Each structure stands twice: as structure tokens, then as C-alpha cells.
Image (tube, helix red, strand yellow):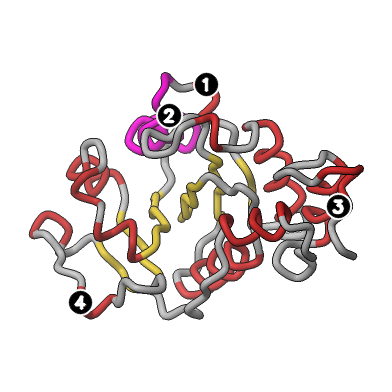
Amino acid sequence: MHVGIFGGSFDPPHIAHSIIAETVRCVFDLELVLWVPTFAPPHKPASRLAPFTDRLAMVRHAISLHSAFQVSDIEASLPSPTYTIRMIQALRKQYEHARFSLIIGSDSLVQFHLWSDPELISKECELLVYPRMGYPIEEIQIPEYLQNQVQWVTAPLLSISGEYVRQCCMEQKSIRYLVSESVRHYVIKHQLYSTVDGGSIQT
């Protein structure tokens, strides 16, 4: 089984996440795209993230209609901070015979050498890299240990970010079409991202 691992804070999961996941699934014929919300990422203070249970629930809502998408809560069982290599090794115990591919943006590839055990990650799985604004693929230098482990993805260049969606919420602006309808209703119902007064985001 070819499994694409799609990690991220998903705070919240938005439409660009879904488009990227589906594009990569189709291009590389992935049998499963496993969405893995981060629990305690080393580069983001936990206090700045919505609770893990909310982010996990929102991903479940976002992918509920796609049979090839699943969500994993594996990072909640790992030591903090939850490094990618630890997550991959834990998933290997669940998917012993799977071929793993890690789905990341070109911005993450630029910083990949700063990750914990990047060479070990490259031995565990290939990298499927999609373009991000400000990080053109043609300008990225690939280290030698990654030369045969990087696959480029031709995908829409989308500037939607979780930060932008959260800002819209804080300003009481509509997030319709930025996230799925079920995620939008979850955000309003649970008053995430400073949605005060009963979640009065514009409808």
C-alpha cells in the first residue's frame, strides 16, 4: 500500500489542504492519504494552537466524504515535542508493509535540514513536494542525501493559510469557501479563534 503522510497543525484545516492532498493522491496514485495533526510541534508553542482535540475533530469533518482520506491521532501518544521522525516510526508499527511518502510544501523543504534526523526521514520515505508562495521549486537546492528522494508535484499555487482563516474569524469575517461547511460550523459552534457572542462569523 502506498500511503501519503500529510502532517500539519491544521489550525484549521482549510480548502487548500484538501486541494493539495487530492492533487498529490491523484498524481502519485496514493491508496491512502493519512492526515496527521501535530500535537506538540517544536516550532509552534502549544499555547498558540487550538486544542488538539478540536483540530483533530475539524480534520475528521474536512475529510469525512473522501474514502481515501483518513486522520490519525498518533502524535497524541508520542513524547513532546512531536518530531516528524518519531511520528513516522510510530506509524510504521501500524503500517508495516506500506510504502510511505511524506507530503510537504516547498517552504518546508527549504527548512528540511533543520528537522530532527532529516537523513533518517529520507530513508523512511520519499518526499512529495508541492509549491508554496515565495518558495519557487526551481530555486531550491537539494542536498545530496535527498537527490533521489524528492518528487515534485505540479499543483495549484494557493495562498490560503490557517493564519488567514484565523484572522478572518477574529475580525468576524466570513470563512465560507475557505474551509468546508462542516468545519465552518464546527468553528462557530465551538467559538474557536475568538469567535465571540455565540460564534457570529458572517454567514
The residue mark sitting in front, 3 or 2, is 3
Residue with the mark numbered 2? 90
Residue 177 against residue 80 in the figure, above or below: below
In screen coordinates, is 58 left or right of 104? right
C-beta proximity under 8 Å, tags 4 and 2: no
Amino acid under disc 2: Ala
Q: Position of residue 16 (x, y in %)?
A: 59, 67
Q: Residue 196: where, in percent of width, then height?
A: 83, 43
Q: CA distance from mark 4 to mark 2?
A: 33 Å
Q: Amino acid at mark 3?
A: His
Foreground pick, 100 / 158: 158
Residue 53 position in % (x across, y down): 68, 31
Question: Which of pointers 1 and 2 lies earlier in the amino acid sequence?
Answer: 1
The quarter holding residue 91 reads: top left
> From mark 4 to mark 1, how far is it between C-alphas?
37 Å
Q: Decide: marks 1, 2 in contact (CB < 8 A)?
A: yes
- The residue mark sitting in front, 1 or 3, is 3
Q: Foreground residue, 91 or 202?
A: 202
Say which quadrant the C terminus sits in: bottom right
Please rate how many residues cluster around mark 4, counting C-alpha atoms within 10 Å: few if below 14, some from 14 to 19, many from 20: few
Query: Who comes first in sequence, dot 3 or dot 2?
Result: 2
Q: Quadrant of residue 56?
A: top right
88 in the magenta segment: yes
- Region in magenta: 79-95
Q: Main secondary structure of the magenta part?
A: helix
